[in-house]
Image (spheres, grey):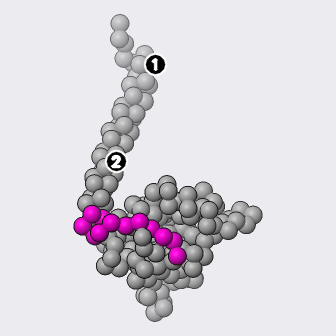
Amino acid sequence: MARLGDLVSRMANGCVYTPDEKNGVPITRIETISDGTINWNRIGHAKPSPEIESYKIQHGDILYSHINSIDHIGKVARYSDCKPLYHGMNLILLRPNSNIDSDFLFFLLSSETIRRIARTLAKQAVSQASINTKELRALELTIPDVGEQIAVASTLSDMDAELAALESRRDKARQLKQGMMQELLSGRIRLA
């Protein structure tokens, strides 16, 4: 068992920023990680400043939703892009240390077991819930040695890739069916 706070070299909220959609630098918002990945269509843009540079996200960093509706509390996304991105408010940045593989930590925090624990830790208000960083730091996690972590993360990554390929084939089949339905139902193609 290890506490989450002992597995990260950084656990911090993002910067408060001035929006600048025209000339700003890309910055995360709560909705940036709503589907478990970094959604580049749902980022904001912040006015560049010297202070914002300390909020630049690094490869392997994990973004954690600690303020959101109860259904979205505990959602995570890992940053593995090369494009610059900055850490905005209302998401916690977790920077894994050498005791834990970043991909393994991502999968562990994404698991329904840990998400359920996060929801029980959350304090609820009218339409939002939140977990404070002290409770997040104290979150106890079961972790194997780093070699096993890497093997587990690799297996789960391979499964994600297979699922993505299957979803892509399904989407193409749906498009093909839609096109065929139009042709058949309009009478442009006859079967008999």
Q: Which mark is residue 144?
A: none
Q: Quadrant of residue 175?
A: top left
Viewer can see residue 187: yes
Q: In this image, 60 relative to 114: left or right?
A: left
Residue in front for this viewpoint, 110 or 138: 138
Q: Residue furthest top?
A: 192
Q: Quadrant of residue 77?
A: bottom left
Dot 1 crowding, Cα within 10 Å, few <14, some 14–19, many 20+:
few
Of the numbered discs 2 and 1, the one sitting upstream in the chain is 2
Q: Which mark is residue 185?
A: 1
Residue in front for this viewpoint, 71 or 174: 71
Q: Residue furthest bottom?
A: 50
Q: Quadrant of residue 148?
A: bottom left
Q: Residue at x 30, y 65 (%)?
A: 149
Q: Which mark is residue 164?
A: 2
**Amino acid found under the numbered disc labelled 2:** Ala
* Residue range of the region highlighted in magenta in the rendering: 138-149
Q: Under tag 1, what secondary structure?
A: helix
Q: Position of residue 122 (x, y in %)?
A: 63, 67
Q: Residue at x 32, y 54 (%)?
A: 156
Question: Which of label 2 and label 1 is nearer to you?
Answer: 2
Does the magenta-highlighted stretch encompass residue 83? no
**Amino acid found under the numbered disc labelled 1:** Leu
